């Protein structure tokens, strides 16, 4: 999986096309999403340690809340976003399966997590400064680029 993440940074469409060629595997899709959420959860630890130190909050409590968010709440939000994107594509007459829409979104999220890990370190060490915002912007840009390219791969595969 890590080699596919690296490959995504160079050829995002090809990686999603390869994943789709393996057939519909809902277990793989949820595993990709949960791996991404797990990595982003871990990426939050340096920031949470900084917040705990600055505010005097208990670090274990902050981590528990973050765990709840990234393991239970965010996956539901990603499923809702994937469903919404599938619906929008269907409305604009783009033939795509709901599975392909989910996989493109989930893979984009996982593939962009290296930037998310760097963002977590940056905010943990330096707080919310200009460099942190720049790394965060790179993370978001990579996520959206990978998502759009994944959707394009899914649309090409259908056509």
Image (cartoon, grey):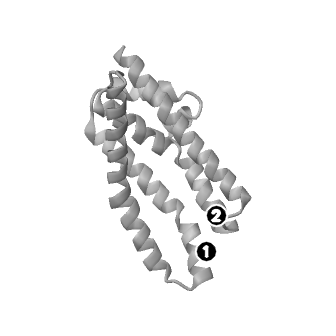
Residue that label 2 marks: 123
Residue at image coords 41%, 71%: 65
Indicate whether 85 appears above or below 93.
below
- Furthest-front residue in view? 91
Residue 50: image tag: 1
Indicate whether 6 appears above or below 118.
above
Q: Are marks 1 and 2 in contact (CB under 8 Å)?
A: yes
Q: Position of residue 73 (x, y in %)?
A: 35, 59
- The front one of 142 and 82 is 82
User: Residues under labels 1 and 2: Cα distance?
Assistant: 8 Å
- Furthest-bottom residue in view? 56
Q: Secondary structure at mark 2?
A: helix
Disc 1 packing (10 Å; few <14; some 14–19; many ≥20): some
Indicate whether 96 appears above or below 123.
above
Q: Position of residue 80 (x, y in %)?
A: 32, 46
- The front one of 67 and 138 is 138
Residue at image coords 32%, 21%: 95
Residue 25: image tag: none
Q: Position of residue 119 (x, y in %)?
A: 61, 56
Q: Position of residue 70 (x, y in %)?
A: 40, 60
Query: Which mark sits nearer the N-terminus, 1 or 2?
Result: 1
Q: Which quadrant of the view contains residue 27?
A: top left
Residue at image coords 44%, 23%: 153
Query: Could you tell whether 150 is left or right of 24 in the image?
Result: right
Query: Could you tell whether 113 is left or right of 127 in the image?
Result: left
State the quadrant of the N terminus. Answer: top left
Q: Which quadrant of the view contains residue 46?
A: bottom right
Residue at image coords 56%, 79%: 52
């Amino acid at each position: 999986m890590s080699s596919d993440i690296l490959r995504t940074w160079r050829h995002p469409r090809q990686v999603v096309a390869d994943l789709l060629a393996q057939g519909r595997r809902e277990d793989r899709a949820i595993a990709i999403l949960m791996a991404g959420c797990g990595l982003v959860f871990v990426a939050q630890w340096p920031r949470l340690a900084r917040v705990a130190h600055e505010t005097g909050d208990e670090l274990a409590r902050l981590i528990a809340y973050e765990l709840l968010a990234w393991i239970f709440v965010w996956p539901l939000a990603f499923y809702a976003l994937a469903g919404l994107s599938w619906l929008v594509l269907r409305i604009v007459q783009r033939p795509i399966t709901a599975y392909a829409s989910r996989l493109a979104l989930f893979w984009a999220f996982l593939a962009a997590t290296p930037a998310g890990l760097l963002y977590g370190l940056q905010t943990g060490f330096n707080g919310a400064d200009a460099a942190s915002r720049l790394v965060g912007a790179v993370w978001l840009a990579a996520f959206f680029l990978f998502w759009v390219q994944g959707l394009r791969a899914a649309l090409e595969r259908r056509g």
